[in-house]
Image (tube, coloured by chain):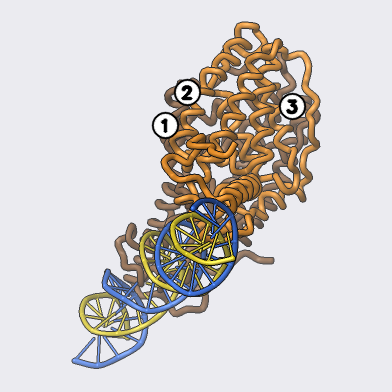
Chain colours: A brown, B orange, C yellow, D blue
Amino acid sequence: MYRDDMSDGDRAHPPLRKDAAANRERLLRAASDLFAERGLEVTLNDIAHHAGVGVGTAYRRFANKEEVIDALLEERMAGVEDVAREAAADPDPWDGVVHFLEGALALQHGDRGLAEMMNNPVLGDARVDEVRERIAPIVTEIVERAKAAGVVRPDLDQSDLIFVQLALSTVMERTQVLAPDLYRRYLALFLDGIRTDRETLTTLPTRALSSQETHEVMTRGRRRARS
Amino acid sequence: MYRDDMSDGDRAHPPLRKDAAANRERLLRAASDLFAERGLEVTLNDIAHHAGVGVGTAYRRFANKEEVIDALLEERMAGVEDVAREAAADPDPWDGVVHFLEGALALQHGDRGLAEMMNNPVLGDARVDEVRERIAPIVTEIVERAKAAGVVRPDLDQSDLIFVQLALSTVMERTQVLAPDLYRRYLALFLDGIRTDRETLTTLPTRALSSQETHEVMTRGRRRARS
DNA sequence: CATCAAGCGGATATGGAATATCCGCTTGCC
DNA sequence: GGCAAGCGGATATTCCATATCCGCTTGATG
């Protein structure tokens, strides 16, 4: 199985006219912005508008939204893979674990679309799944190495990092506006729960939210009602 | 005996005919089932069908879905309040903390609608908010008591229980089908991160998911695509 | 047991939102 | 200068949830 040899969408088509190619780029950049900012729910019409081109142009270049997502987000997921590799390569096994979680979450922090992609089993099916499968063994390696070094509890499992990441991403999403870094507080708590070194407590990196703020976060959601 | 004048929702209405009152009950029971099972996204039409009555009947009794939700879920939220009170009354301050988290999550575990209600700031506005405000001080008490007793880390905050609950509810929802109890594993990890007693590790209550299972969970979501 | 308002069912109208197309006009390219 | 390629964006299409309407049925009442 080889990677797509042609640089990008050119395939067997006659090359795009200069203006058309430029518009394609503007569309991709607009999509990138919007996905990061608002998540994958933006419409192709939104993207066209944001790019300053007509809807028709958008639909002439991309059959549908998934095609745009695929074009953009496989590369983003590959970024997660890089983080995992870096983490696995970290000389200190414990730092590796921390590095992976912090890195993966930081990426999602800057890109809501990526977060949705990673944590929702919905869009951008095939290619993203493939990346996920490439990442899994690296995570296993990170965890096994830390266990072997005795720095994490022996009953920790590779899948635990995935689910903790999932859990924290929810906190992240929900507090993104009011307290964008709050998720790091809970990451720290979790890390203190998996370390073998039980002597010291990590200093929590973020202050907790006040009652008032908590109430606001749990109350004013921006996620649209289904109804 | 008869003549239950304005005891509940009747207001200034003449009392319902016997069959109509029965249907109203069936509708509420059906709604309760469906909310618990499928969450708040079910339609009033769904509810009517499940209750074995026509759609018209449903709309004659309830102006819209929110009215049904309000009728049912304020009481469910009150259940959470009870759990908080029990927890605050637990003789052991540490057990109180555990009790609250386990209890709140267990309630959500059996009722998807309740989970959505608690964690989504969307539907059933006014009354649920009010309950939330009644719960907040109890949670504060639980946490403060535990801190005073020295059983949890001093930098723990009342709001932390809320956000941990939020984080875990995501795991719970995502694994409900394949591994309904998995969330308890992560609850245990968090608890180990919160305790002051750093000598022992809690035995994790649930086995971790295999790679295969993890992949399945992260892949086959049932949450509808926005697209 | 006759009467009739209250209640019922469910086909269907309404509304809204996202997706996708069409067509008259413009523009890069040879 | 000619014309295929490209463009804009109004609009058709699809889908789905919400809500209504109306001819038929039924419980309550005298």
Between B138 and B70, the one lying in front of the other is B70
Provide the chain ID for the residue under circle 3.
A
Q: Which residue is mark 2?
A: A209
Could you tell which of marks 3 and 2 lies nearer the N-terminus? 3
Give the residue type that dot 3 points to. Answer: Val
For residue B72, which quarter of the picture?
top right
Q: Residue at x 59, y 35 (%)?
A: B76
Percent of width and height locating residue A227 = 47, 52
| Disc 2 from disc 1: Cα separation | 9 Å
Between B161 and A111, the one lying in front of the other is B161
Could you tell which of marks 1 and 3 lies nearer the N-terminus? 3
Between B127 and A31, the one lying in front of the other is B127
Between D19 and B137, the one lying in front of the other is D19
Disc 2 is placed on an element classified as loop
Label 1 near label 2: C-beta < 8 Å?
yes
- Mark 1 on the same chain as mark 3: yes
**Left or right: where A221 falls relative to A193:** left
Tell me the number on the disc at residue A152: 3
The answer to whether residue A120 is visible is: no
Provide the chain ID for the residue under circle 2.
A
Q: Residue at x 56, y 47 (%)?
A: B40
Height in image: A98 above or below A28?
A: above
Provide the chain ID for the residue under circle 1.
A
| Disc 1 from disc 3: Cα separation | 33 Å
Give the residue type that dot 1 points to. Answer: Leu
For residue B206, which quarter of the picture?
top right
